[in-house]
Image (cartoon, coloured by chain):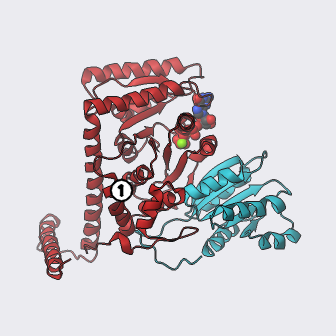
Chain colours: A red, B cyan
Amino acid sequence: MLSSVSSADVEPIGRGVGHRTVDQLVSAARGGERRATARLLTLVERGGETASAVADAIWPQVGSGGTDAHVIGVTGPPGAGKSTLVAAWLTQLVAAGRRPAVLAVDPSSPLTGGAILGDRIRMSEASAAGVFIRSMATRGHAGGLALAVPGMVRVLELAGFDPVVVETVGVGQVEVDITSAADTCLVVVNPGMGDAVQANKAGLLEVADLFAVNKSDRPDAADVRRDLELMLDLSDMTGHRRPGVAERPAVISTTATTGAGMDELAAALDGHRDGLVSSGALHDRRRQRWRSEVRSHLAERLRRLADATVADLEPKDNRSPNALVEDLIASIFEELVEDVDSRCDRGD
Amino acid sequence: MDNDTPDQGSGEAPVRVVLAKLGLDGHDRGLKVVARMLRDAGMEVVYLGLRQTTETIIDAVEQEDADVVGISMLNAGHLTLGPRMVEALSQAGLDVPVIIGGIVPDDDRPAMAAAGVAGVLGPGASAEEVVACVQAACRRC
Ligand SMILES: Nc1nc2c(ncn2[C@@H]2O[C@H](COP(=O)(O)OP(=O)(O)OP(=O)(O)O)[C@@H](O)[C@H]2O)c(=O)[nH]1
Ligand SMILES: [Mg+2]
């Protein structure tokens, strides 16, 4: 039940990658080989034992403190211009000598499990400039995203990318959680359509460190700015704010299609990170991110254990479901202890 | 390449397909239809859209760790651009099958196959044909 795989004996087979072990892929990715990085992302995304082997191989090199890379979550309503904005901003960063990467998450179809990942459409120029872009589907149960994304971010950090940007559509709770687990969370909204109100409902107001009011070329851009400032006033009064978020989020006007506002945006994001470093909040946020990652993995293991435990269960006349659970937990722990004992005896 | 090693992940991972329109103009209605067909068959489509170059396609195939690449092109471009794409991918060390979509006369198909193009899909291809073509190309990789 509690199997373990050492990273040395896993051999992923791949198209054009050849037969390389996880350790070989890790050192190639570390040396900047994009193909190895892409393959590691695939292995982590797939989950299971190979993903654990990759995590084990990378962890000592990245460590609990994380790297110097700035991890930035970008979220907001569908079509707000997140991809266009990320592309324009990161293209500028490349020109300034940085090495950015994006993980762009789009929903899978709940019916077929397939997905059309369209974020790259807006990122051709950024791709040509050298930005590393990886598209990702949510794949089935929402918990999968929470399991895979932190590990994939770590692969990109290992490969030396900075910043590492995660784009998600700000609708589902998991998506919002993932973006807000970043060092810095940027929320993109639009004029019209009551985006500020929508963002408020989706819980984006509390998690935002920064707002971009995109499509500022539109006539009603001033209105959304005002709505946003009003709602921030309100949350100032009620004290509704994410822990560790001391300052009122900055609101920056952008036009992603022309690049207007990108300099201010880049400066504000860098400034936010500097603030986190000097206040010590970066450390707190990363510890929080680490905890929620551990929690996701633990929850997944327990979920599987629960599935396996009830698979062949028959109703019992003398035990209520509630009482039965107490029995089951006791027997599961007994089994786990035996398992560990026998491994100790074997000297594993 | 061989593909015999069991998938060690949790469950079967979906096939990942990069779809792009190579060349300067045109529209991508047909390509969008193909994208939907593949999604409805449970595949993950990384959609690049219009005005792609061999370089942007290669970058996408590499970074997305794609299993197959599908390229749509203008009439009459297929004989030069198709083989050039195959060649460019293999020079980049990417052993990923290429499927060409567009109006390709039957007479040209042997030459395309000889150049390493894994499949050709005409404008009227049904969803079954499109999906079968991608699956067949994928099995050979
Ligand atoms: N007028 C105007 N249009 C913009 C601007 N930024 C983006 N757009 C357009 O808005 C549309 C959506 O842009 P995307 O970048 O795909 O938006 P997104 O938020 O990434 O969308 P999803 O990932 O699908 O949620 C595209 O047609 C863009 O060209 C802007 O600043 N002004
Ligand atoms: Mg997008």
Residue at 86% x, 57% y: name it.
B76
Mark 1 Cα shell of 10 Å, populated few (<14), some (14-19), many (≥20) = many
- Labels in figure, total: 1
Residue hosting label 1:
A147
- Judging from the image, mark 1 belongs to the subunit labelled A
Q: Nearer the viewer, residue B122 or A153?
A: A153
Q: Quadrant of ligand 1?
A: top right
Residue B96's image quarter? bottom right
Between residue A241 and residue B97, name the one nearer to us.
B97
Is A250 situated above or below B139? above
Task: Identify which residue is drawn at 43% across, 61% down.
Answer: A27
Task: List the single residue furthest toward the right.
Answer: B107
In the image: residue A318, left or right of residue B88: left
Give coordinates of residue A69: x percent, y percent.
Answer: 40, 42
Q: Which residue is the extreme one toward the front? A: A31
Query: Is disc 1 placed on a helix, strand or loop?
Result: helix
- Residue A324 against residue B27 in the figure, above or below: below
Note whether ligand 1 is within 8 Å of mark 1.
no
**Residue B124 spot, x, y in % from top left:** 78, 62
What's the amino acid at mark 1?
Leu
Residue displayed at 39% across by 56% down? A148
Residue B103 visible? The answer is no
The quarter in which the C terminus of chain B is drawn is bottom right
Q: Residue at x 25, y 23 (%)?
A: A238
Q: Is residue A7 visible?
A: yes
The location of residue A143, given as percent across then percent down, is: 36, 55
Q: Can you say whether A69 is above or below A108 in the image?
A: above
